[in-house]
Image (spheres, helix red, strand yellow):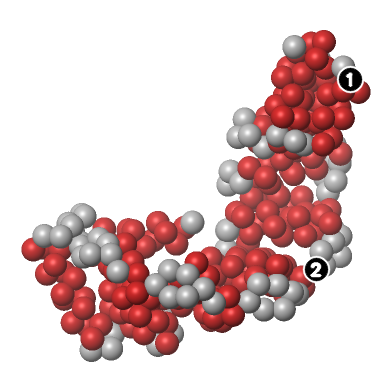
Amino acid sequence: MKKAIKYFLLLFLLTGCGYNHNNDGNEIFNEVLNKAEQGDADAQYEVGLFYFSGKGISMDKKQAFDWFKKAAEQGNADAQFMVGFMYKAGEGTSIDNEQAFYWFKKAAEQGDADAQHKVGGMYYSGIGTSMDKNQAINWYKKAAEQGDADAQNFVGIMYKIGEGTSKDFDQAFYWFKKAAEQGQVDAQGFLASCYHHGEGTSIDYDQAFYWYEKAAKQENASAQFGLGACYYDGYGTKVDKKQAAFWVKKSSEKGFEPAIIYWHSRELWKYE
């Protein structure tokens, strides 16, 4: 998660390259705490980070939650996200999905991409709010437009199957490609399938093979099956029944039903 990198970079800078439980670290914490106690929202958020991570001070999730909430109530979007996260996970407070949704939405409305992703997921599943697939794709799309690869993949899926929107293979392809190019493994498999079957783009077996292989090597069962089928039929590569057997078997061992059927119907055990 991009936000986690941001948090720890901030702590790294605040603690002067990673001091922990020493005079320098305590001095920095006390300076930030002094500002926080005077009502500075950014400092309140930073104190929350210190307590949440245990960097420069003993970890205390309850104190972290309290300081994040002080900052959140003053409109700090990062703190609002963290309050939502802690309500959702039950860290420093009891699990409360409605409160989690409330605070994620507050942060999302300020443009926080991670929060927009969370709001999309909660609308999609009906956790903390009523299920609303239209709202789900709207919020996923906001995060996707900010470069969130997982959100881009979800938007692609929703366009592909017509959930919360009309089916649109062109849009599905567009978003799968965005996510795949960032390394999102499920999107790489979906993108390969688009090229394989000509959904949202022209059939291109070379590209299908390329993306199936990338995802298959990251243990994506669907892509492993697709790659095996490409080897069996010679799509995007030379026919290689041994490689077909290898990849289809890997997929079938993960319980992927089409691979299990393909394994038996093509008698692929003969080529092991």
Circle 1/circle 2 CB separation < 8 Å: no
The amino acid type of the residue labelled 2 equals Gly
What residue appears at the point 19 percent right and 71 percent down from the top-left corner? 29
What residue appears at the point 40 percent right and 87 percent down from the top-left corner? 74
Residue 19 vs residue 42, the one in the foreground: 19
The amino acid type of the residue labelled 1 equals Arg
Could you say which quadrant of the image residue 201 lies in?
Answer: top right
From where the camera sits, is residue 270 visible?
yes
Name the side, left or right, on which 224 lies relative to 58: right
Q: Identify the mark nearer the N-term, 1 or 2.
A: 2
Q: Residues within 10 Å of mark 2 (few under 14, many from 20)?
A: some
Could you say which quadrant of the image residue 76 lies in?
Answer: bottom left
Q: Which residue is mark 2?
A: 164
Q: Which residue is mark 1?
A: 266
What residue appears at the point 62 percent right and 72 percent down from the top-left corner? 119
Position of residue 73 measured from the top left corner of the image (x, y, whole percent): 42, 87
Q: Residues within 10 Å of mark 1 (few under 14, many from 20)?
A: few
